[in-house]
Amino acid sequence: MNHDREEKKIAELFDELKRQDQLHAPPFARLWAAAVSQSERAGRRRVSLRLVAAVAMVLLVAGSLVILFKQPSGPSTPIERAEFALAISGWRSPTDFLLAPVDKQLLRTVPRLDESLHEIQTIASYKN
């Protein structure tokens, strides 16, 4: 019997919680209407994003075609072409010195296992 009373008390407590929730909860119809209007706004946003993406793609393709079919403005006479080729072949990068090793002379000689570094350096300096 004690067990039945506890179950009834628990059921009454749950009913009280349910009544309190119903007092504070907004009506379902208002929530449903808000959800529908929000989804309609999101749908309009999706359409506008698709339109923006399509316009961007059209502009990208149009720009690519303009660049592709534009006439090159390089040297036109053979003399100008030769001068241009000569100028390009003599060009050096401003950072070209960074690619050169610190001590080129040491790298030009092959070290021997029975020599010290000092002897290798003196041999390299005599070869110059």
Image: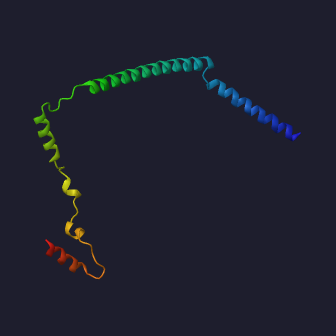
- The vertical placement of 94 against 35, above or below, is below
Whether residue 16 sits left or right of residue 79 in the image: it is: right
Farthest right residue? 1
Q: Position of residue 7 (x, y in %)?
A: 81, 37
> Who is closer to the viewer here, 99 or 71?
71
Residue name at image x 16 percent, y 43 percent? 88
Is residue 103 in view? no
Viewer can see residue 66: yes
User: Which percent across, then down, holds residue 48?
Assistant: 43, 19
Between residue 44 and residue 18, name the one nearer to us.
44
Left or right for 108, reference 87: right
Of 86 and 29, the residue lying toward us: 86
Q: Residue at x 14, y 33 (%)?
A: 75
Residue 80's place in the image compared with 94, above or below, is: above
Q: Quick one: which residue is furthest to the front in this view?
A: 78
- Res. 51 image quadrant: top left
Q: Quadrant of residue 49?
A: top left
> Which residue lies at the image location 13% right of the left edge and 43% below the top edge?
86
In the picture, which quadrant includes the N terminus? Answer: top right
